[in-house]
Image (cartoon, rainbow, N blue to C red):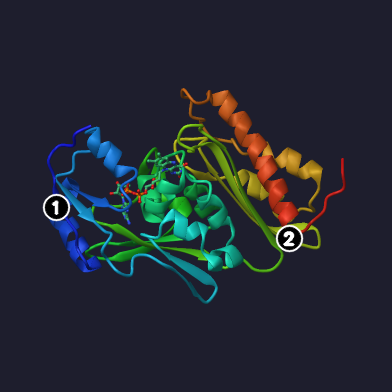
């Protein structure tokens, strides 16, 4: 558990961090909360020559509303998301999801940017980011781009981030009208990571689903948006029959992970059960009462 030697720098501006990143390329690693990176460095699974600590860069954390969007700085901690009154009102799926991450120490240090960049297939926030149709701002030395959450994750712990880019912000829509959200997961007992986790937001008008987002983590090598389920539910009248039938499409086209925590068939089963429950809970929170079976 002794890391290989590395240099440590703590820039105070984003420009300086980007310059350092561009100058050191693959040899450099950004450090945010350190809760995923430092264990890897200690185990020598990651051997950066230089760590660029983002923690002193002002403007990279905080949560603010701009029109119908909420902008979250990449260094915003899970605890800050969990306790944000603005998010609780305007986008409650994120606080609900952040509250279920690890334990209080992890939530006090871990950041949304670090969680998304790390792209652990069992991380919680990606499910909510995907369900909400959030976008990430990636800032590099030459350019800056906004990318949709669903285009960000490529594979197991792999994203579209270039070695010279930093996630600087995440934007999510202010939810309005009659809506409900829910994040449910089967946690791995020791760490809290999701064996399967499902995030849902649903908009309801006249007892029909007029918009829906379903994000899934833990099931496959990367988090994904369950488009098959969304397609089936969109525009339909809400009742038990359609939720039962349509949630079963969640593992469509997915190769489920198979490890010591859960076999592939069990994970697929969990995904269907949790998708069903998360949709039902979101519908309930939207104030729609369904007739008992
Ligand atoms: C005991 C334990 C339990 C945990 N349980 C859970 C859980 O239940 N659910 C869950 O989702 N997570 C869990 N985590 C992970 C936790 O949420 C981490 O905080 C998160 O995965 C990484 O965030 P970080 O800020 O610590 O990133 P770091 O560890 O600092 O960085 C992680 C990676 O992201 C890169 N990076 C960081 N910030 C940026 C940025 N702004 N732009 C580009 N790249 C960046 C780093 O270079 C590094 O490669 C757990 C961690 C521990 C130690």
Looking at the picture, how far across and down is residue 273, in whole percent?
Answer: 67, 35
Query: Residue 221's image quarter?
Result: top left
Residue drawn at x 58%, y 24% is: 265
**130 or 92, nearer to the observer:** 92
Queried on whether the Cβ of the residue with tag 1 lies below 8 angstroms from ligand 1, the answer reads no
Q: Is residue 262 left or right of residue 213?
A: left
Secondary structure, mark 2, is strand
Looking at the picture, how far across and down is residue 208, in whole percent?
Answer: 77, 57
Q: In the rendered image, is residue 232 in sight? A: no
Q: In this view, does 221 lie to the left or right of 96?
A: left
Q: Give the quarter of the figure containing the C terminus.
A: top right
Q: Give the quarter of the figure containing the N terminus.
A: top left
Looking at the picture, how far across and down is residue 179, in whole percent?
Answer: 69, 61
Return the disc, 2 or 1, that comes first in the chain's sequence.
1
Q: In this view, does 128 lie to the left or right of 147?
A: right
Q: Residue furthest bottom?
A: 67
Q: Residue furthest front?
A: 104
Mark drawn on residue 231 = none
Residue drawn at x 15%, y 52% is: 8
Residue drawn at x 23%, y 65% is: 142
Mark drawn on residue 24 = 1
Looking at the picture, how far across and down is residue 244, in whole percent?
Answer: 75, 39
Q: Is residue 139 left or right of residue 280?
A: left
Secondary structure, mark 1, is helix
Residue drawn at x 21%, y 54% is: 52
Write down the residue under mark 2: 204
Graded by Cα atoms within 10 Å as few (under 14), some (14 to 19) or many (20 or more), the crowding at tag 1 reads some
């Amino acid at each position: 558990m002794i890391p290989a030697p590395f240099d440590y720098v703590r820039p105070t501006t984003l420009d300086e961090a980007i310059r350092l990143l561009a100058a050191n390329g693959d040899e450099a690693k950004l450090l945010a909360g350190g809760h995923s990176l430092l264990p890897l460095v200690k185990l020598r699974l990651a051997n950066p020559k230089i760590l660029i600590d983002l923690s002193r860069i002002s403007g990279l954390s905080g949560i603010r509303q701009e029109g119908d969007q909420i902008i979250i700085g990449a260094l915003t901690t899970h605890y800050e998301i969990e306790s944000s009154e603005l998010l609780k009102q305007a986008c409650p799926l994120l606080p609900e999801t952040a509250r279920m991450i690890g334990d209080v120490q992890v939530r006090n240090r871990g950041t949304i940017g670090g969680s998304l960049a790390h792209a652990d297939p069992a991380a919680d926030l990606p499910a909510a980011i995907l369900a909400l149709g959030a976008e990430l701002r990636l800032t590099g030395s030459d350019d800056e781009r906004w990318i949709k959450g669903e285009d960000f994750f490529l594979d197991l712990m792999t994203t579209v981030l270039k070695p010279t880019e930093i996630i600087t912000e995440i934007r999510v829509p202010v939810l309005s009208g009659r809506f409900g959200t829910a994040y449910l997961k089967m946690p791995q007992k020791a760490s809290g990571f999701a064996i399967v986790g499902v995030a849902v937001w649903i908009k309801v008008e006249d007892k029909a689903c007029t918009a829906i987002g379903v994000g899934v983590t833990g099931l496959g090598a990367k988090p994904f948006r369950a488009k098959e389920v969304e397609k089936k539910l969109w525009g339909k009248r809400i009742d038990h029959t359609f939720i039962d039938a349509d949630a079963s499409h969640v593992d469509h086209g997915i190769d489920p992970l198979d490890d010591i925590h859960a076999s592939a068939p069990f994970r697929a089963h969990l995904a269907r059960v949790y998708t069903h429950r998360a949709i039902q809970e979101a519908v309930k929170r939207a104030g729609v009462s369904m007739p008992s079976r």
